Image (tube, rainbow, N blue to C red):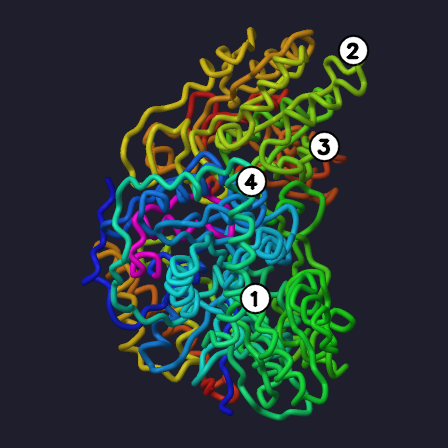
């Protein structure tokens, strides 16, 4: 178990990220139950919250379950939190839309962390649209300090109006650190316990129709509330040019136009119509500044207010102060130097990563690789180039099966699905059921590295421990696949590339569903970093012929050293040899994947008998 | 309105850039400034190029540095000092760790590592402060203290007392490596101090 922090430990001014501030806000609001699935840029909220005393915080298998757990906690009478990245809310959309009907007992807030610019995501959807579509209020803080306060306000609104509430951050709110002042801990009014309220909680059509009416009444009340909500505020300045904005965009507007009048919306749904119209009537030239969709703009225009917005402000990617200034005044920023052409530095699988072994083996099959979401998506990059599709969490199995149905028997041996252990737990299991039930022959490779790698090593149901570090039951992936009905389940060590290739070839040709589990822990796990039996590899320079076979692994530890013609000869190589490979001992992790790839036996254990 | 100070820190994932920017932020807070620091997690960290924006002043709005407005740039790796050129202006003090970490296109032989990185910076009239942080860290006995050497190097350009820096280092670093980190900081500071006659314009005042 990890050590817990109690309230007296936290005081004064703190430098916190938006995510850390949300955790502190949840703690101060008296949240009792918090559930999430890790996803950038939301992960650190629960990682921080789990260190506070008196809060139950957990990783759920996916966002739908996380929201259902939080909703159940709310039904049980406590304040509850569910956090997720933007695409996670797609998964949790089902409970969200009906939770808007049931309402709550204890306050319920769902944090959606959007990722404009797609720093670490597959799309840049604007989740403000969910607030409108699901008919729930949404708050949007601009920085860490507001994030904490807005979360606390969110619980009060949720309880007062009997509604779940969405709090939206973006990457630059979630991951920007700023000053936050610790505050008092609230004692929520509701008490935990069972209270049966079937008319409110059982959404049979007869009940749901009644709740539907309540939902509209609630939205009417919230619209009224928004008019007087202190976090919807006007900062009067020069009235020639005025801005309506929210979230991070507010900070860009203040930076770019410090003299202008600004209506800052703390609540982006529902909007304060009278306040907006009043502001607009005083302003000569009104702009709406928002990232991604014209959400506020569209709703303001529907009120009959004339404004400018996406006709000048980009709808794609992040904004910044310079973009806002240039879009509106046409004036160029202060850029002095043009960028120069230098080698790219894309992210890469780590040295010693077990994924490298399996993807190297897969790349030799020439098959279509239906991929999934995780570190291993990086296998799509050169030189492995071993992924041909990647859509969303869990999509690999369904898409591989769909291609198989489209092409028929001819596709046997030509398609393989690849999915990580955490992603399989998240939403891969149902795809596996589909393959077996509908008589497919899909080959599924499950990459079991014992953790959720890309988001920073969170345990999952197949790991054997929980968010707070307790030992728990471990899902046996092999037994699970057999129980689903997969007859051919094999486990391989992906560091052994020859064996992995052999098993892959056998299974992909099989006219029945098959699963290959590659089992090797992520090298960044503490137990792997600490291991003492690590034996590094080296390349005997005189034996290297410069054939570049080892470079096909794309291991950051293997470096190519180019040679000039005279240089090659001087060093004892053939005159035509263009260069040689060497292993950087600082980077090598001793996985040994590279050694068998060298036909000239130049790659050996450092300090071993063959060196 | 008083000016906001802009410090850009860049390098390669895993070099300790986030901790370095965290220490610099804490120092500036202790010195009485409002601070905002922007960084990106997740996919960007797997050996890819990493950048952190640190802004400080009386009141900081945007967490992002605009093109052409960095006061100080600290590059934790040689090549990376060129990647963020559009953020620099003529007066930017560019601290460059001369350590090379080969990016994938170079290590796989597809591209070559430019031989004239420092010259490219200098030819644009920038004030460049090269420092061999890796070997300095090694000489004090901890190769992982590269980031602390660079915090020391950067500290020369900030009008904040050395004592405050050392206080924050003590707070942030576990006891058993505290001494090594202090030494790394002081060594980095000393080396850039020695270049002082060459420093135009002195310290950066927001």
Task: Name the image quarter holding residue A251.
Answer: bottom right
Nearer-N-terminus badge (4/3): 4
Q: Is residue A100 above or below residue A391?
A: below
SS type, badge 4: helix
SS type, badge 2: helix
The reply to whether the C-beta atoms of the residues labelled 4 and 3 are less than 8 Å apart is no
In the foreground, A193 or B54: A193
Question: Within 10 angstroms of label 3, few (less than 14), some, or many (20 or more) residues?
Answer: some
Which of label 2 and label 1 is nearer to you? 1
The residue beneath circle 3 is A388
The residue beneath circle 1 is A268
Residue A7 located left or right of residue A351: left
Q: How far is the residue under mark 2 from the one under mark 3?
A: 20 Å
Asked if residue A437 is among those painted magenta in the image, a careful observer would answer no
Which of label 2 and label 3 is nearer to you? 2
Residue A495 in the image, given as x and y percentages of width and height: 51, 23
Which of label 1 and label 3 is nearer to you? 1
Nearer-N-terminus badge (1/3): 1
Nearer-N-terminus badge (2/4): 4
Nearer-N-terminus badge (2/1): 1
What is the number of the mark on residue A409? 2
Residue A402 in the image, given as x and y percentages of width and height: 73, 23
Boundaries of the magenta span: A25-50
What is the number of the mark on residue A94? 4
């Amino acid at each position: 178990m990890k050590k817990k922090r109690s309230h007296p430990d936290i005081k004064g001014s703190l430098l916190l990220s938006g995510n850390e501030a949300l955790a502190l806000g949840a703690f101060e609001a008296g949240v009792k139950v918090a559930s999430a699935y890790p996803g950038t840029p939301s992960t650190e909220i629960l990682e921080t919250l789990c260190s506070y005393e008196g809060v139950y915080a957990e990783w759920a298998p996916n966002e739908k379950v996380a929201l259902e757990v939080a909703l159940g906690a709310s039904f049980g009478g406590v304040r509850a939190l569910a956090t997720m990245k933007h695409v996670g809310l797609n998964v949790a959309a089902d409970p969200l839309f009906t939770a808007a009907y049931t309402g709550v007992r204890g306050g319920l807030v769902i944090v959606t962390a959007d990722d404009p610019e797609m720093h670490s995501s597959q799309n840049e959807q604007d989740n403000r649209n969910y607030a409108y579509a699901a008919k729930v209020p949404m708050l949007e803080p601009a920085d860490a300090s507001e994030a904490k306060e807005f979360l606390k306000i969110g619980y009060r609104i949720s309880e007062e109006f009997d509604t779940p509430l969405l709090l939206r951050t973006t990457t630059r709110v979630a991951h920007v650190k700023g000053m936050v002042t610790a505050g008092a801990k609230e004692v929520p009014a509701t008490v935990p316990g069972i209270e049966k309220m079937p008319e409110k909680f059982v959404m049979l059509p007869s009940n749901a129709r009644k709740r539907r009416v309540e939902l509209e009444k609630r939205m009417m009340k919230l619209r009224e509330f928004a008019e007087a909500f202190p976090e919807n505020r006007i900062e009067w300045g020069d009235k020639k040019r005025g801005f309506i904005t929210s979230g991070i965009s507010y900070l860009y507007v203040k930076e770019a136009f410090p003299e202008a009048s600004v209506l800052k919306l703390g609540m982006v749904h529902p909007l304060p119509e009278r306040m907006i119209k009043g502001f607009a009537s005083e302003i000569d030239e009104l702009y709406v500044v928002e990232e991604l969709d014209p959400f506020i703009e569209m709703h303001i225009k529907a009120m009959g207010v004339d404004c400018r917005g996406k006709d000048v402000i980009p709808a794609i990617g992040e904004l910044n102060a310079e973009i806002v200034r240039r879009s509106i005044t046409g004036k160029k920023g202060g850029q002095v130097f043009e960028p120069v052409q230098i080698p790219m530095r894309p992210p890469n699988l780590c040295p010693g990563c077990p994924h490298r072994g399996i993807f190297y083996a897969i790349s030799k099959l020439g098959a279509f690789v239906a991929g999934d979401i995780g570190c291993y998506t990086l296998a799509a990059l050169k030189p492995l180039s071993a992924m041909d599709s990647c859509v969303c969490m869990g999509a690999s199995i369904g898409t591989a099966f769909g291609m198989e149905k489209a092409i028929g028997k001819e596709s046997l041996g030509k398609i393989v699905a690849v999915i990580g252990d955490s992603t399989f737990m998240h939403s891969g299991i149902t795809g596996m059921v589909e393959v077996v039930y509908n008589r497919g022959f899909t080959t599924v490779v499950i990459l079991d590295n014992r953790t959720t790698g890309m988001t920073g090593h969170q345990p999952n149901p197949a790991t054997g421990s929980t968010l707070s570090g307790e030992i728990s039951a471990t899902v046996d992936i092999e037994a699970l696949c057999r129980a689903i009905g997969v007859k051919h389940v094999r486990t391989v060590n992906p560091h052994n590339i020859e064996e992995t290739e052999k098993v892959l070839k056998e299974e992909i040709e099989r006219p029945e569903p098959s699963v290959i589990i590659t089992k090797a822990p992520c090298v960044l796990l503490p137990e792997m970093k600490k291991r003492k039996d690590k034996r590094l590899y080296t390349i005997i320079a005189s034996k290297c012929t410069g054939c570049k076979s080892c470079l096909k692994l794309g291991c950051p530890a293997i470096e190519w050293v180019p040679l000039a013609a005279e240089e090659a000869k001087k060093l004892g190589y053939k005159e035509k040899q263009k260069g040689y490979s060497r292993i950087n001992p600082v980077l090598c992790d001793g996985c040994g994947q590279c050694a068998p790839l060298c036909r000239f036996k130049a790659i050996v254990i450092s300090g071993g008998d063959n060196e | 309105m008083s000016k906001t100070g802009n410090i850009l820190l860049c390098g390669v994932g895993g070099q300790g850039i986030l901790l370095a920017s965290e220490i610099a932020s804490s120092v500036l807070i202790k010195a009485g400034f409002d601070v905002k620091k922007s960084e990106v997690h997740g996919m960007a960290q797997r050996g890819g190029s990493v950048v952190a924006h640190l802004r400080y002043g009386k009141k900081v709005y945007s967490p992002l540095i605009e093109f052409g407005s960095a006061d100080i740039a600290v590059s934790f790796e040689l090549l990376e000092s060129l990647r963020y050129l559009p953020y620099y202006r003529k007066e930017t003090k560019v601290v460059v760790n001369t350590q090379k970490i080969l990016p994938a296109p170079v290590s796989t032989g597809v591209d070559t590592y430019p031989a004239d990185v420092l010259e490219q910076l200098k030819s644009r009239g920038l004030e460049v402060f090269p420092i061999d942080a890796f070997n300095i860290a090694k000489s004090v006995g901890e190769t992982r203290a590269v980031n602390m050497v660079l915090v020391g190097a950067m500290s020369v350009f900030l009008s904040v007392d050395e004592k405050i820096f050392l206080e924050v280092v003590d707070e942030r670093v576990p006891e058993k490596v505290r001494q090594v980190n202090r030494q790394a900081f002081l060594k980095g500071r000393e080396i850039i101090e020695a270049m002082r006659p060459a420093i135009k314009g002195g310290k950066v005042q927001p």
